[in-house]
Amino acid sequence: MTSLLGIDLGTSSVRAMLMRSDGTRLGLAGRGYDVDIPAPGRAEQQPEMWVARAEEAIREVLGAPGVDAGDIAALSFSGQMHGLVCVDKTGMPLRPAIIWQDQRSKGCIESIYARFGRDRVGGWVQNSIAAGFLVASLVWLKENEPDVYSRIDMVMLPKDYLKYRLSGVVATDYSDAAGSAAFDNAALSWSGELLSALDLDPRLFPPCLPATERVGTVTPEASARTGLSTRTVVVNGGADQCMQGVGNGIVRSGVFSSNIGTGGQVSAIADKPLYDPAFQTNTIAHVIPGRWTLMGATLSAGAAMKWLSQRILAMDGFGEVDALAGAVPAGSGGLVFLPYLVGERTPHLDPDARGMFCGLTLGHGRANLLRSVMEGVAFALRDSLEIILQMGIPCSRMIASGGGANSPVWLQIQADIFNREVVRSLNDEQACLGAAITAGVGAAVYPGFPEACDALVRFDPRTYVPSKDAAARYAEFYAVFHDCYRDNKETFARLAILEDAN
């Protein structure tokens, strides 16, 4: 039977999943890695490290019993969004990739808006420009590392560099291009007006094609490194948020996704390129033709829990985290957490925002801190939910995904804070599944995304129903959560200045 390979290049790991066309999983492998923080507010990764880890994962999957590389009809990709990879004429990276968590370009963004105005820029790309987005990082590079900028032959988004190393083809797709803030989502092309205004050479930007486009086959060199067949078709792929949506069966309007990975996102599908007039969320061309994703993001979701549980409390394993947090009532004993550990995107667009615990007393312990982080992340996600609802997109169902969906306590917290029923997919690798489905659609294994998702996506029969009392209590804490940011915004900016001075 035909098999398909989905590869998800994330922020903390790369994963490869091989499945038969009927959805039977043949193998899953992953390799973890860290984000390099060369200075406060900066976040980088080595593109060649992504390739090495991905190829290790692919070799492991192909080594599973009964797997024949010759049966793999196609492979495709899901990738972390927004990051900047710069390559020279030989196709090799000129410097480490500047990824989505990076905040160094905040001054460049302020200058862009001062020159052209937020509304004008937003009209060009239907989005705001945030720190960590490709176009902002590229402007920073041009101003601060001109020697590197002068040697750039092409800029790529993270998954596109991995695709290039496997196929030899340089291309991106509409969904990932949309996350660069240099893409006109209405015209489905790079924004000539924005690139001209910023004096960026349009020749640096790769061809932009549909996610299901067959861009090539596995090269002999990549075949030798991985064991993949040179007959395997390489399908373009897309942004991880769209791929997670596909892997969760979100292919029709009215269904929302709440994802808690390293960052956190709430997203929904629209049938036209709607965008928030205040530009607090992002509009992203979907991997599904004729659809767009509306997405709000918090930068530290699972990352905030990892920071607290592992770095601060030295805990190992999520079972203990869940047990402790689940023993604390809603509200964490009067403790509120702002998860703005690397600045924040939705709704504040504030790279200077900082994390904080508000309301600490001698009576609080580990359990209160852990639950407060879960609640703070869910409050931040609710901000995105509320904005998308105000844009006229109804929410009939909320599907939870990412590592946070493995926590029953966190799922119930989301249901209570969102005041909506929450379900989770039984597939624990939604982005990989979305990439594999995209490979199948591109290779004509499936007639389209709806048919593939209807056949392959299954949901946990348990539904997390909001508690009326908890929802009412969280509504009060949600107001305090907003006050904590509003009342400390100027203090955060002052701290950022002091931090930059060092």
Image (cartoon, rainbow, N blue to C red):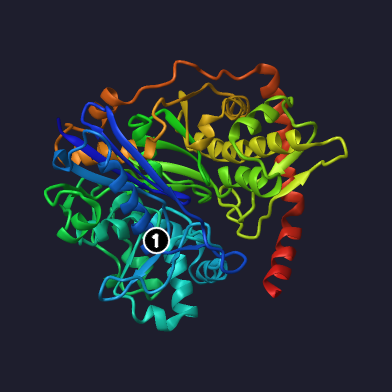
Q: Residue type at mark 1: give it.
A: Met
* Location of residue 297 in the rendering, given as x and y in whole percent from the top left corner: 52, 46
Whether residue 142 sits left or right of residue 278 in the image: it is left
Q: What residue is at 69 percent from the left and 34 percent from the top? A: 371
Judge by depth and name the residue closer to the eye, 74 or 471: 74
- Write the residue at 61% across / 41% down: 380
Horizontal side of 258 relative to 293 (left or right) equals right
In the rendered image, residue 403, in percent from the top left (x then y), is placed at 50, 37
Q: In the image, residue 359 lies at what x, y percent?
A: 82, 41
Q: Which residue occupies the extreme left position in the image?
A: 231
The quarter of the picture where residue 246 lies is top left
SS class, disc 1:
helix
* Residue at the spot of label 1: 49
* Label 1 CA crowd tier, 10 Å (few <14, some 14–19, many 20+): few
Residue 191 visible, this orientation: yes
The percent position of residue 283, horizontal first and vertical second, equals 41, 47
